Image (spheres, rainbow, N blue to C red):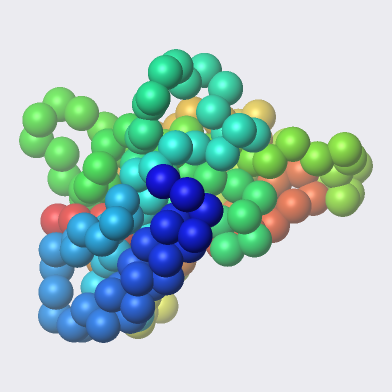
Amino acid sequence: MGLWSRALAASTAVLIAGCTTANSDAATPSSGATASPAGCATRVETGALPDWADAGFHGDTRPPHVFGAKGDIVAVLFAHPLRVTRTDGSNNKILWVARATTASSDPAAPATLVITATRDGTDTTVTREVAGGPGPSIIDLPEAGCWRLNLRWSGHTDTINLTYAP
């Protein structure tokens, strides 16, 4: 798919995502991406990971993933959709991959990835930590819905919206 086709597909996905209804609980497939209910703006990509995030993946692997708002971190979703309750024995495994930088914006900042998650439309906030910074994690959240995750690691910050199904 050429650059122009990818740009058109991405634009179409954004337009479709903005037109979903607030009562919709299902993700809507669109050109390699799924959108969550309106207001959440979670965009789960299913295309190839960027070069800076594909270490350890082989061949034409296209895992579901969500980019941070700044584009400097990606959440690779090994369980999609993410769920509050998993009855199949799986878990909400997320691989956090941060874009390599030449230096931390704050060398004294701890490497731990601190996630402050707030459920959309509520005051419900929880904190999760990934020791050692971005990497593999199990991120369980207490309620279904759209969650805005404020991410802090090694002097960097970004935000990602993730939707958890019941």
Q: Residue furthest left?
A: 87
Residue at horizontal 56%, vertical 56%?
68
Relative to 73, residue 31 above or below: below
Compare residues 111 and 159 and report the one nearer the observer.
159
- The residue at 42%/18% (across/down) is 59
- Tell which of 62 and 23 is nearer to you: 62
Residue 72 in the image, given as x and y percentages of width and height: 66, 50
Quarter of the image where one finds residue 146: bottom left
Q: Does residue 116 show up?
A: no
Quadrant, the C terminus:
bottom left
Image quadrant where residue 130 sits? top right
Q: Is residue 154 above or below residue 20?
A: above
Q: Is residue 43 left or right of residue 144?
A: right
Image x and y of residue 81, in percent = 23, 47
Given residues 53 and 5, the one toward you in this image is: 5
The x and y percentages for residue 5 are 42, 57
Left or right, 78 with respect to 154, comes to left
**Residue at 44% in and 37% down:** 48
**Count of all numbered marks drawn on residues in the image:** 0
**Residue 18 appears in the rendering:** yes
Picture residue at 27% right of the left edge, 66% below the top: 36
Residue 122 vertical placement versus 140 (above, below): below
Name the one closer to the observer, 107 or 52: 52
Is 111 on the left or on the right of 18, as rendered? right
